[in-house]
Amino acid sequence: MSTLVRPGRESRSATGEFVGTMLLLRLYARRDRVTAPLWIAVLGLMPALQVVSIKDLYSSPDQLARFARTTANSPALLAMYGPVFSSALGSIGTWKAGAMYAAIAIAAILTVIRHTRVEEETGRAELVGSTSVGRFAGLTAALLLTFGAATVAGIACALSLVAASLPLAGSVAWGCALAASGIGWGAVAAVAAQLSDSARTTRTIAFGALGAAFALRAVGDAGNGVLSWLSPLGWCLQVRSFADERWWVFVLLAAFATAATASAYWLRDRRDLGAGLFADRPGKPQAGPALSGLMGLAWRLQRGSMITWGVGFALYGLLIGGAVNSVSGMLGDSATIKNAVTSLGGSVDLTKSFIGYAVAMLAAAAAAFSISSVLRLAEEERSGRAELILSAASRYRHLGAHVLFAVVGPAVALGLSGLGIGVVWGATTHDLAGKVAESLAAVAVQLPAVWVVTAIALLLYGAVPRFAALAWAALSVMILVLLVGSLGTFPQYVMDLVPFVHPPKLPGASFDAVPLVWLTLIAVLIAAAGSVAFRRRDLR
């Protein structure tokens, strides 16, 4: 007598599907022993740092109330950061920190994909699966690691907010919303990992969903608020921490995470290891001229991120230009606030100082774009493709093709943001040509600072590829010093270590080429050291 088994399925027990989960969890935790604590610390402490800075700037209830009124009347600010639900210190202090909901989503997406789809694409999951490891063990371990890290970040956030003398209920709500965002988007990444056999396509799907959620939230908050209820990012804001908390919103967040997690397991059970549910489309028999050579290959690998970052920078530039007219109302009559803004913006003109400050933040974001482009080299090396390429090409040519996009890409993205700022700013002041020129100059002078970060990432990849991801840690520290240091928290010698401090603070300050020359020279020297180190070491 024979036993009939459904086609494509094996006879297996439910408990056997999860065998080896804890061993894989230990392995993934060890591999993320640097990156996971880093993003947990940054995301868990940043909201409290924002509250501390707001507390130092706005010393009276009247100033807080004026800030809340001005923000509510600015669609551009509402689109960027969401609504302010009350004039309480906690609500206003954590207003800009609402971007952490998207930031933890990015961290969760990258973590899940790194331990699921990347493992399958490189063949490591197949080797592990040949042992006594269940079908769902890898997915479960990746989700446990991500969900646990998001939960720890939420707990750290709540504790740090309580330490900043904020109400317990609001602090717990904010921390829970942060954790829920990480858990929900980690589950979305798990679903995306089942759809394609390419890690790059998987990231595109997950980040596309996140971008759509952000767009719904931004358009909804700038309008009547209806579309915000279609976005999980909007739900995190609708918890209304420090403003009569809506605890029932967590039901929506829990349902979202549960549905996505269940879908990931259901889809995983219906595909083969290494495959995706979406079939690959056959490519052309021969590559076109645009894809020939090392430069064509680098363009093929980098173009998706360049387009995505470029569109995002252009839209953010438009929002910054639209928020210019709200600056005076937001800042109020506090001398401390004006001193902080003019310190970062370099001008007594609050509008120009606001643009200078915003451009410095855009430069830091452009540096993140640059780091991701450089670390594409590490991904090519880990996958084994770099070894095939270098069998027929020199290392310097291979390195230079990708570094070119890491240098040019941020320049294009910043240029688009400067154009967006100038167009909207010029339209409101009836000086389109002049404001566009000022805005483009403001972003252009930031490029040498961005290239310094690019060179640091290249040096880490070339010299110590195992720790190349520390470039993200370096950038995170720079941003923290830049934000908090504007209040005079750090001594000047610490501020001088941040490259974004040195460019001329256009459009308010006068132009000075000396710091730009020094920054460019430093970037060239560091990049040269990284290139030589890559030339002399073995491939991993």
Image (tube, helix red, strand yellow):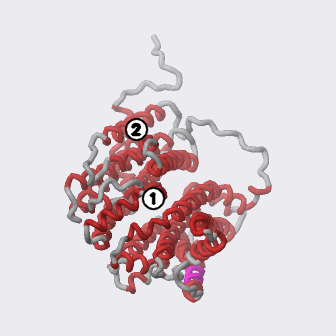
Mark 2: give few (<14), some (14-19) or many (20+) Cα within 10 Å: many
Q: Which mark is residue 261?
A: 2
Residue 173 left/right relative to 223: left
> What distance separates the C-alpha of mark 1 from that of mark 2?
37 Å
Q: Amino acid at mark 2?
A: Thr
Q: Name the residue tied to disc 1.
A: 74
Across and down, in percent, residue 505 comes to 51, 80
Q: Which mark is residue 470?
A: none
Work out whether residue 373 can be spotted: yes
Work out whether residue 31 can be spotted: no
Q: Amino acid at mark 1?
A: Ser
Secondary-structure class at tag 1: loop
Q: Residue furthest bottom?
A: 514
Instruction: Pick whichever of labels 1 and 2 is earlier in the sequence.
Output: 1
Q: Residue furthest front?
A: 430
Q: Residue at x 37, y 27 (%)?
A: 13
Range drawn in magenta = 519-526
Location of the C terminus (image quadrant): bottom right
Across and down, in percent, residue 86 comes to 30, 56
**Could you say which is closer to the camera, residue 8 or residue 69?**
69
**Could you say which is closer to the camera, residue 389 or residue 325?**
325
Secondary-structure class at tag 2: helix
Instruction: Classify residue 58 by image quadrant.
Output: bottom left
Q: Residue at x 45, y 31 (%)?
A: 266
Across and down, in percent, residue 198 comes to 58, 46
Mark 1: give few (<14), some (14-19) or many (20+) Cα within 10 Å: some
Residue 520 painted magenta: yes
Q: Are marks 1 and 2 in contact (CB under 8 Å)?
A: no
Q: Can you tell which of label 1 and label 2 is closer to the viewer?
A: 1
Residue 334 painted magenta: no
**Could you say which is closer to the camera, residue 440 or residue 523?**
440
